[in-house]
Image (cartoon, rainbow, N blue to C red):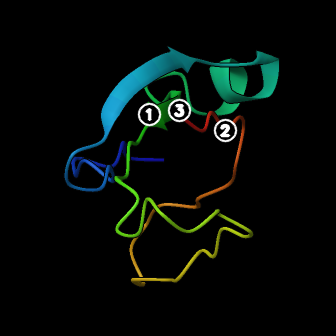
Amino acid sequence: MTPVSINPAADGAELAWAGGNDWLRKHSPDWSMRLYKSTFPNPRPDVAISRIDYVSTMTEAAPFLVGLTLE
């Protein structure tokens, strides 16, 4: 497989972790798995957050939630 040369991170996201696993190192040694940190301001800080929705922008990224901190 040819490594993807695009950066799949969303605007404002920063690389938090990069690594691999045995399967990836064996089959695609030039690739890595990456997790990005994203921060979003609450547009309505006077209203409690009751849910988080993911909306696809049809990019190569596959978003999923690893952790969440609310302030």
Q: Residue at x 29, y 56 (%)?
A: 10
Give the secondary structure at mark 3: strand
Q: Residue furthest front?
A: 46
**Is residue 67 found left or right of 40 in the rendered image?**
right
How packed mark 2 is, by other alpha carbons closer than 10 Å (few <14, some 14-19, many 20 or more), is few
What mark, if any, has residue 59 been given in the picture?
none
Judging by the rendered image, the residue that carries numbered circle 3 is: 35
Instruction: Kindly identify the amino acid type of the residue bearing the numbered disc 1.
Output: Lys
Vertical comparison of 7 with 66: above or below: below
Q: Quadrant of residue 49?
A: bottom right
Task: Give the CA distance from mark 3 to mark 1.
Answer: 7 Å
Q: Position of residue 50 (x, y in %)?
A: 74, 68
Vertical comparison of 30 with 58: above or below: above
Judging by the rendered image, the residue that carries numbered circle 1 is: 37
Q: Residue at x 50, y 83 (%)?
A: 56
Instruction: Kindly identify the amino acid type of the residue bearing the numbered disc 2.
Output: Leu
Q: Are marks 3 and 1 in contact (CB under 8 Å)?
A: yes
**Is residue 26 found left or right of 18 in the rendered image?**
right
* N-terminal label among 3 and 2: 3
Say which of marks 1 and 2 sits in front: 2
How packed mark 3 is, by other alpha carbons closer than 10 Å (few <14, some 14-19, many 20 or more), is some
Judging by the rendered image, the residue that carries numbered circle 2 is: 68
